[in-house]
Image (spheres, helix red, strand yellow):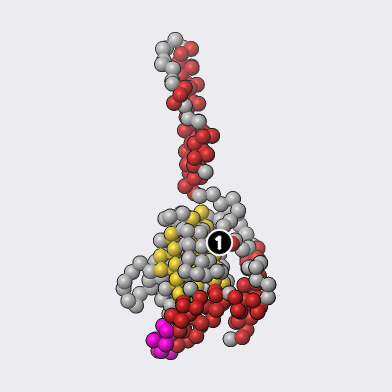
Amino acid sequence: MFSRLREDITSIIQKDPAARNAWEVITCYPGFQAIVMHRCAHWFWLRGFKWLGRFTSHVARVLTGIEIHPGATLGRRVFIDHGFGVVIGETAEVGDDCTIYQGVTLGGTSLSRGTKRHPTLEPGVIVGAGAKVLGGFTIGAGAKIGSNSVVVKPVPAGATAVGNPAHVVKKEGAQSEAGAAQLFSAYGVTQNSDDPISKVLHKLIDHAVSQQEQIEKLTQAVSHAGIRCDNPDMKDKIDPKQINILVD
């Protein structure tokens, strides 16, 4: 037990530059306190003391603002940062080295008892503040869920999901396992990770501008051939810079 506590404290100090020492983590980090209390509640739950497990979970919620059902499974070195408003459902599974920020919900969309209703987070997943992961599917290892995203379908390993509903952006380029283990993106934010919808819109705008230029060239060629063509209204021309600013 004490080895797992040391792991948790070390992981928090590594991931949070505001954490100065172990005593500060133990006394001032509600995420750490909630996980310790959850382990007690989970122990009761697995041994048939259901009410005692739920009551321990309830006390933890009152003290920390974090609600973890005693039936949920949490791995090693899970870090709940800030934590207020985090809700983790009964059949949720959180893998080793996952990071969850405030306001996150790992929720279920089914009322069927005895079924897998809540998501599974594989090792190394980062879930940004306010994100909602709803359903009994799997978020792949090392995936990142952007802040305030609403995820309702599986996310591949190493990918980033952003938006409402969330759109998946696959990670560009291969990366070694050692490099992936050292990579940490606070709040699920990655460098140069544009919204996939905006990327598609930018491509459509560029395509429309290219077509506009081709039409102008064809119109000029037809006019030189002696065929009369009405000149297009210059006011209706697409201004790519103006539209791209609106899309960004």
| Image side of residue 221 versus residue 191, left or right | left
| Residue 242 seen in this snapshot | yes
Name the residue located 47 percent from the left edge and 26 percent from the top edge.
Answer: 237
Judge by depth and name the residue closer to the eye, 171 or 23: 23
Residue 208 point in image, percent of width and height: 47, 33
| Image side of residue 199 versus residue 19, left or right | left
Q: For residue 106: magenta?
A: no
Residue 110, placed above or below residue 161: below
Give the residue type that dot 1 points to: Tyr
Residue 238, placed above or below residue 202: above
Q: Which image quarter: residue 96?
A: bottom right
The residue carrying mark 1 is 187
Name the residue located 54 percent from the left edge and 34 percent from the top edge.
Answer: 241
Residue 173, placed above or below residue 40: above
Judge by depth and name the residue closer to the eye, 91 or 170: 91
Residue 248, placed above or below residue 84: above
Name the residue located 51 percent from the left edge and 75 percent from the top edge.
Answer: 64
What segment is highlighted magenta in the picture?
45-55
Residue 159 point in image, percent of width and height: 53, 58
